[in-house]
């Protein structure tokens, strides 16, 4: 007798047992039972092209990563209070991917935890509290991360920022306060940061945090020159600069291994998550010797699971795979082809207002009218659901949830790209009709 619950039963049980604000993707929910590289399989063995899940960075259940985890799990899994060559090797390999000043690692278990730790490091180093954040940003699910995430504290159920959090406009040249037709846009966006610093008056600045390419903000590539002037102003005021690379790191943007490198800046603290464990919960913070030394103030830092042997073995296997399989270069070249193909779609579909991104970090912004840029929110939701019915998985994001988010596992190939663009074309035609 088959005792596996039906999809309907699984949904029923979930609604009964789990918190209701745990969201479920798609109107017709998916019951995914297995994954292999860039493909997911549901309970009826239907294959889906995953163009959304950046966590499975080197591919769902990549055999090398699975084997590394299995082997280490059967040997030892304990904490960082014992000497281990594995954590040293992982840290050494990780810092080698950064500019030389970023040379100290801390390991935790999620992006939220890594951002929490980054904030502690920044506060201890600067002995200050005031933090500048980008509008619409998301940095995690803990209490303090909600405090610094306008996407959450300004959204449904939120109660606004605490007084130490200072929000500046997201430098979005398509929909933001200053747009690409304003030659002075970058200076004006940076000026908002300078204005906050001036308003702080005698209150010392702790720092500035931003994703290197804001994702929930709508897959935004920051305008060139923005971070350079913001970082200068923040440092001049005694603050530190934190780059949240939870979504953009590990070669995803194609041109560079880390998102911040795209702007020729070097942060003081970098936050790592999602892709580095390929689904295994690993978060990390990489910082300078100076900041790590300030943090070493007598209070022990310890995470029970952070930096455990299995996590390090998996982390190393992921890093080896990204490098060994040339995934950054692949994301760069196929990402450019996809940008081109999506821009071609834009010339055929009025609903596409903007196509942007880098590598396998792409956004397609949908509008009802190209002039007014009225967000096509309902249409975006409908399109993503229709794509799901055609077995191609995408998501939406942006302040108006009208940006199609394309962030596939890195093995996503040429045939997958054709499948995605052709399916999207088909659906956009049906929506227009
Ligand atoms: N920072 C960014 C930019 C994120 O996108 C996320 C997760 N979506 C986080 C932090 C939090 O990571 P986690 O869910 O692993 O705690």
Image (tube, rainbow, N blue to C red):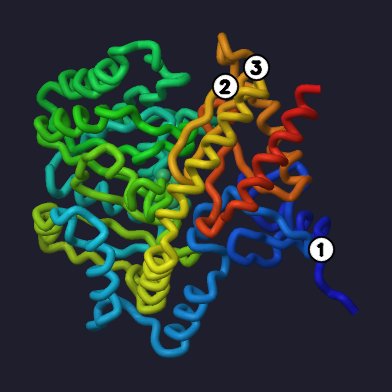
User: Is there any visible trace of residue 374 in the rendered image?
Assistant: yes
The 10 Å Cα crowd at callout 2, few under 14, some 14 to 19, many 20 or more, is many
368 versus 394 height, above or below: above
Taking the spot 9% from the left edge, 31% from the top edge, the residue there is 236
Tell me the SS state at disc 1.
Answer: loop
369 versus 74 height, above or below: above
The 10 Å Cα crowd at callout 3, few under 14, some 14 to 19, many 20 or more, is some
150 versus 301 height, above or below: above
Tell me the SS state at disc 2.
Answer: strand
Taking the spot 44% from the left edge, 59% from the top edge, the residue there is 327
Q: CA distance from mark 2 to mark 3?
A: 8 Å
Tell me the SS state at disc 3.
Answer: loop
Counting residues from the start of the chain, the first of labels 1 and 2 encountered is 1
Q: Position of residue 148 (x, y in %)?
A: 36, 37
The disc placed on residue 44 is 1
Taking the spot 32% from the left edge, 77% from the top edge, the residue there is 79
Counting residues from the start of the chain, the first of labels 2 and 3 encountered is 2
Residue under numbered circle 3: 368
Counting residues from the start of the chain, the first of labels 1 and 3 encountered is 1
Q: Position of residue 347 (x, y in %)?
A: 62, 23
Q: Position of residue 164 (x, y in %)?
A: 26, 32
Quadrant of the rendered structure where residue 77 is? Answer: bottom left
Q: Residue at the far bottom: name it.
A: 75
Residue under numbered circle 2: 353
Q: Position of residue 99 (x, y in %)?
A: 19, 53
User: Is there any visible trace of residue 16 in the rendered image?
Assistant: no
Taking the spot 55% from the left edge, 41% from the top edge, the residue there is 338
Quadrant for the N terminus in the image: bottom right
On screen, residue 235 versus residue 432, left or right, reads left
The 10 Å Cα crowd at callout 1, few under 14, some 14 to 19, many 20 or more, is few
């Amino acid at each position: 007798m088959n005792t596996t619950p039906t999809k309907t039963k699984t949904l029923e049980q979930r609604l009964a047992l789990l918190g209701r604000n745990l969201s479920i993707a798609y109107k017709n929910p998916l019951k995914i039972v297995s994954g292999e590289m860039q493909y997911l399989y549901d309970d009826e063995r239907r294959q889906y092209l995953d163009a959304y899940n950046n966590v499975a960075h080197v591919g769902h259940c990549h055999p090398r990563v699975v084997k590394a985890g299995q082997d280490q799990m059967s040997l030892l899994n304990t904490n960082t209070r014992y000497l281990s060559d594995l954590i040293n090797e992982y840290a050494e390999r990780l810092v080698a991917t950064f500019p030389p000043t970023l040379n100290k690692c801390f390991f935790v278990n999620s992006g939220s935890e890594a951002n929490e730790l980054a904030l502690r490091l920044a506060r201890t180093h600067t002995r200050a509290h005031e933090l500048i954040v980008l509008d619409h940003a998301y940095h995690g699910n803990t209490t303090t991360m909600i405090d610094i995430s306008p996407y959450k504290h300004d959204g449904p159920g939120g109660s606004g920022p605490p007084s130490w959090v200072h929000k500046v406009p997201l430098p979005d040249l398509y929909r933001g306060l200053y747009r690409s037709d304003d030659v002075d846009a970058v200076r004006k966006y940076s000026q908002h940061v300078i204005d906050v610093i001036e308003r702080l008056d005698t209150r010392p600045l702790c720092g500035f945090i931003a994703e290197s390419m804001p994702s929930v903000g709508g897959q935004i590539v920051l305008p060139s020159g923005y971070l350079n002037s913001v970082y200068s102003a923040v440092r001049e005021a005694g603050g530190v600069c934190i780059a949240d690379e939870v979504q953009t790191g590990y070669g995803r943007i194609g041109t560079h291994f880390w998102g911040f490198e795209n702007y020729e800046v070097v942060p003081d603290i970098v936050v790592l998550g999602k892709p580095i464990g390929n689904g295994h919960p690993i978060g990390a913070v990489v910082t300078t010797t100076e900041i790590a030394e300030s943090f070493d103030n007598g209070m022990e830092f310890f995470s029970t699971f952070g930096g455990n042997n299995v996590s390090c073995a998996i982390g190393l296997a992921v890093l080896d795979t990204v490098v060994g399989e040339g995934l950054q270069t692949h994301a760069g070249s196929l990402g450019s082809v996809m940008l081109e193909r999506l821009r071609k779609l834009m010339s055929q579909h009025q609903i596409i207002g903007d196509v942007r991104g880098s590598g396998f970090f792409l956004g397609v912004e949908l509008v009802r009218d190209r002039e007014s840029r009225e967000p096509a929110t309902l249409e975006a939701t409908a399109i993503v659901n229709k794509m799901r019915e055609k077995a191609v998985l995408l998501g939406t994001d942006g302040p108006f949830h009208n940006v199609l988010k394309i962030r596939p596992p890195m093995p996503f190939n040429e045939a997958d790209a054709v499948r995605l663009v052709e399916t999207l074309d088909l659906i956009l035609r049906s929506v227009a009709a």
